[in-house]
Image (cartoon, helix red, strand yellow):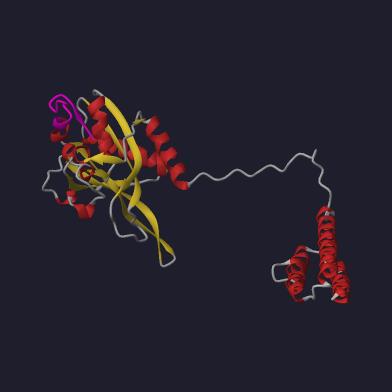
């Protein structure tokens, strides 16, 4: 048994000489020092040694274990402390980190706010979690309107929260602005809105809207169209061309759909098409009534 331990020590130290990287050190540790390694096997075999030889064998086994562990740790520490590669000059200035790019939605919002700001609009904010009054009733959308159904909105659950929903339009900000500000006023609202649409290339359950509200004396459809034309040319370029089509919205009367002529790729070639950008119209008198504004004195779009 003592001869076997001498041979084990020689074999382990010889094998350790060739270990030079992390993988080799780990393989050596598992083979010799691991829970199922050769040293563990030798220690388990100590029970089979005769009573007379056991003191000498046990002492020698501890010496072999100490020798192998000591040589392994020394060789591993020496390898880790050996510098590989070029020295680093810590006094050398660091490399400049490249700046990240702003998200395209953030850039678009800032550009829209800039254009509307030059036209006299100020930004107004409102909560994304709304009540039915601001999202429907104050916008002249009655209880019987199909747009108020659970299939078309994200309502919260519960007896109390069941009347709250994620706003479906930024028009809720208009109501809150008219509740807290006296006319004349000129605000724009930009933010996320939520509708349970099926996801495809042009639809998502969360998207962004932007809209403006202008209230003053003698505001007319002429002012509305002029504002839209000026915005289109300032934002899209001087060649921008828009049109208004008659439409219906509960909160505006008269109402219109806003289209813009754009080049759309079709079969690899650009083709001019009218693309819908949104809806517009004159503020309905019932909306003014809901927020306490006299529709005989004030008009707006």
Q: Which sits in the foreground, 33 or 63?
A: 63
Which residue is situated farthest in the front direction here?
52
Residue 293 forms part of the magenta stretch: yes
238 vs 276, left or right, is right
Residue 99 position in % (x across, y down) = 60, 43
Magenta stretch? 289-301
Q: Is residue 68 above or below residue 182?
A: below
Q: Quadrant of residue 200?
A: bottom left
Residue 246 forms part of the magenta stretch: no
Instruction: Indicate the quadrant containing the N terminus: top left, top right, bottom left or bottom right.
Output: bottom right
Q: Which sits in the foreground, 9 or 25?
A: 9
The mark tally for this picture is: 0
The secondary structure making up most of the magenta span is loop
Q: Is residue 63 above or below residue 137?
A: below
Residue 66 position in % (x across, y down) = 83, 61
Q: Quadrant of residue 237?
A: top left
Residue at (27%, 30%) from the top-left corner? 177
Q: Is residue 222 visible?
A: yes
Q: Is residue 223 visible?
A: no
Q: Is residue 139 above or below residue 145?
A: above
Residue 2 position in % (x across, y down) = 87, 74
Residue at (29%, 56%) from the top-left corner? 197
Q: Is residue 271 above or below residue 159?
A: below
Residue at (79%, 41%) from the top-left corner? 90
26 vs 157, left or right, is right
Q: Quadrant of residue 49?
A: bottom right
Instruction: Indicate the quadrant containing the C terminus: top left, top right, bottom left or bottom right.
Output: top left
55 vs 139, left or right, is right
């Amino acid at each position: 048994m003592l001869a076997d331990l001498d041979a084990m020590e020689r074999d382990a130290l010889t094998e350790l000489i060739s270990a030079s990287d992390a993988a080799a050190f780990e393989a050596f540790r598992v083979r010799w020092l691991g829970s199922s390694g050769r040293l563990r096997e030798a220690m388990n075999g100590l029970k089979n040694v005769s009573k007379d030889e056991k003191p000498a064998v046990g002492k020698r086994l501890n010496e072999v274990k100490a020798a192998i562990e000591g040589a392994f740790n020394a060789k591993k520490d020496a390898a880790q402390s050996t510098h590989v590669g070029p020295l680093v000059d810590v006094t050398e200035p660091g490399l400049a980190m490249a700046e990240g790019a702003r998200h395209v939605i953030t850039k678009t919002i800032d550009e829209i706010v800039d254009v509307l700001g030059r036209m006299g609009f100020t930004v107004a904010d409102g909560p994304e979690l709304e009540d039915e009054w601001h999202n429907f009733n104050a916008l002249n959308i009655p209880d019987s309107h199909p747009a108020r159904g659970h299939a078309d909105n994200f309502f919260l659950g519960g007896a109390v929260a069941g009347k709250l929903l994620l706003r479906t339009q930024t028009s809720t900000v208009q109501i809150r602005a008219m509740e807290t500000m006296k006319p004349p006023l000129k605000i724009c609202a930009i933010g996320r809105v939520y509708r349970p649409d099926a996801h495809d290339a042009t639809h998502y359950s969360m998207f962004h809207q932007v809209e403006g509200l202008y209230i003053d004396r003698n505001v007319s459809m002429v002012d509305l169209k002029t504002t839209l034309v000026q915005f289109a040319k300032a934002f899209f370029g001087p060649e921008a061309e828009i049109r208004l089509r008659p439409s219906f919205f509960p909160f505006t009367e008269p109402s219109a759909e806003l289209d813009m002529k754009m080049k759309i790729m079709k079969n690899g070639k650009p083709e001019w098409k009218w693309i819908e950008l949104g809806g517009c119209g004159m503020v309905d008198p019932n909306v003014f009534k809901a927020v306490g504004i006299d529709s005989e004195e004030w008009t707006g779009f």
